[in-house]
């Protein structure tokens, strides 16, 4: 059994892309592995979020993950800042992380381009904190997107370096988690690119039926196929990509055949798509509505997660302290 660790950003409102690209796999992997999922609130501070929103953001995202099927009795679901051992491990690891290697990471370079007036130390040491997130549970697998691969490589380097310096075989070299499913990239409804919050082209998991219908009916299409079996332009292929994610193979085959013999009616395709998206998200939306206002349940989940995560973190940290020569009198 692998120990899997995954971070979750601390702003809520998940969309279909998040669901098919990440969340659905988390729900599956929790049953096959020892899983830790944490809401990365320390990490979010590098961009100075408004303190009045931070807590509500965490509540939203927590309720969304629970609604989608993360089971706090199966996986360990916790808030990063509830586990101060992570901050201590980050400090200890930072003693063996070099400024030069941190300055060279692609994400740091991009951040200083994006926010030149706020090049804080947290941005530079972001990969050290991320390594601490992973190594605090000695995680062997981390589900990462393309943009995080370099950070995981750094985590392995820090782990190797620690093992070498102290002559131990303590930290594992964490590898990317490869899912049983091919990861689907969900396109936006506006013709091109992927579905993303900043692109403003999302169907959210908490959208109601009417909103979903409206968004899908407005999706960009073309004037329709003029020759049988012609290749699909991107705008139409995108709708089919979403259809394949949410509909049955029969429905997909039916609309594909209609595309191929030029009898397709985009209105029908969109109606079907809206209905099947709604069927996919409705159970999540309904559960979310129940959970998000249930203060007692949420705080129980958070307490339970913190307790489990701290037990695991403390087991690692006390050994790290010992290895580094920090001993109690
Ligand atoms: P983000 O919402 O950009 O912070 O992404 C969070 C996670 O959702 C990442 O791990 C991505 O792999 C996944 N994700 C985001 N957008 C999409 C998309 N359009 N299609 C597939 N996966 C996505």
Image (spheres, rainbow, N blue to C red):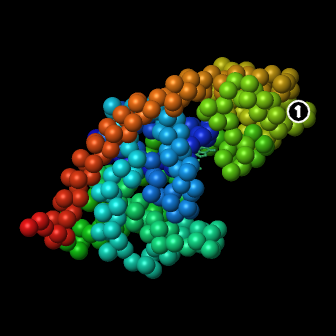
Residue 193 vertical position relative to residue 172 in the rendered view, above or below: above
Residue 69 vertical position relative to residue 35 in the rendered view, above or below: above
Residue 38 vertical position relative to residue 253 in the rendered view, above or below: below
Q: Position of residue 300 (x, y in %)?
A: 36, 34
Residue 130 vertical position relative to residue 221 in the rendered view, above or below: below
- The reply, left or right, for residue 141 in relation to residue 69 is left
Q: Which residue is mark 1?
A: 224
Q: Is residue 121 visible?
A: yes
Q: Position of residue 110 (x, y in %)?
A: 60, 68
Q: Position of residue 27 (x, y in %)?
A: 44, 34
Q: Residue at the location (19% across, 65% down)?
A: 321
Q: Position of residue 235 (x, y in %)?
A: 79, 41
Relative to the observer, which residue lies in front, 198 or 117? 117
Kindly tell me whether mark 1's CB lies below 8 Å from ligand 1: no
Quadrant of image for the N terminus: top left
- The reply, left or right, for residue 17 in relation to residue 134 is right
Q: Secondary structure at mark 1?
A: loop
Q: Residue at the location (67% across, 26% down)?
A: 208
- The reply, left or right, for residue 206 in relation to residue 216 is left
- The reply, left or right, for residue 313 in relation to residue 270 is left
Relative to the observer, which residue lies in front, 51 or 68? 51
Q: Residue at the location (44% across, 69% down)?
A: 125
């Amino acid at each position: 059994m692998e120990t899997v660790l995954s971070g979750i950003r601390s702003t809520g409102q998940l969309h279909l892309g998040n669901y098919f690209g990440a969340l659905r796999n988390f729900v599956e992997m929790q049953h096959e592995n020892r899983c830790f999922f944490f809401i990365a609130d320390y990490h979010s501070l590098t961009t100075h979020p408004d303190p009045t929103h931070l807590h509500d953001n965490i509540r939203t995202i927590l309720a969304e993950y629970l609604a989608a099927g993360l089971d706090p009795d199966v996986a360990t679901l916790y808030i990063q800042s509830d586990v101060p051992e992570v901050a201590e491990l980050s400090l200890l690891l930072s003693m063996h992380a070099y400024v030069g290697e941190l300055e060279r990471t692609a994400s740091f370079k991009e951040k200083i381009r994006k926010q030149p007036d706020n090049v804080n130390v947290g941005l530079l040491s972001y990969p050290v904190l991320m390594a601490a997130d992973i190594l605090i549970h000695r995680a062997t697998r981390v589900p990462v997107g393309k943009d995080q691969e370099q950070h995981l490589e750094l985590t392995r380097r820090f782990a190797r370096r620690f093992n070498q310096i102290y002559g131990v075989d303590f930290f594992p070299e964490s590898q990317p988690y490869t899912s049983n499913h091919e990861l689907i990239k969900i396109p936006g409804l506006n013709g091109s690119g992927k579905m993303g919050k900043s692109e403003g082209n999302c169907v959210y998991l908490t959208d109601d039926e009417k909103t979903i219908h409206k968004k899908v009916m407005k999706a960009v299409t073309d004037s329709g196929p003029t020759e049988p079996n012609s290749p699909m332009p991107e705008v139409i292929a995108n709708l089919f990509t979403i259809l394949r994610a949410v509909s049955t193979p029969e429905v997909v085959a039916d609309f594909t055949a209609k595309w191929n013999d030029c009898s397709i009616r985009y209105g029908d395709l969109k109606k079907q798509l809206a209905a099947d998206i709604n069927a996919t998200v409705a159970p999540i939306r309904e559960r979310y509505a129940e959970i998000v206002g249930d203060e007692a349940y949420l705080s129980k989940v958070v307490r339970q997660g913190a307790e489990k995560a701290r037990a695991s973190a403390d087991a690692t940290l006390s050994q790290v302290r010992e290895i580094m020569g920090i001993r109690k009198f």
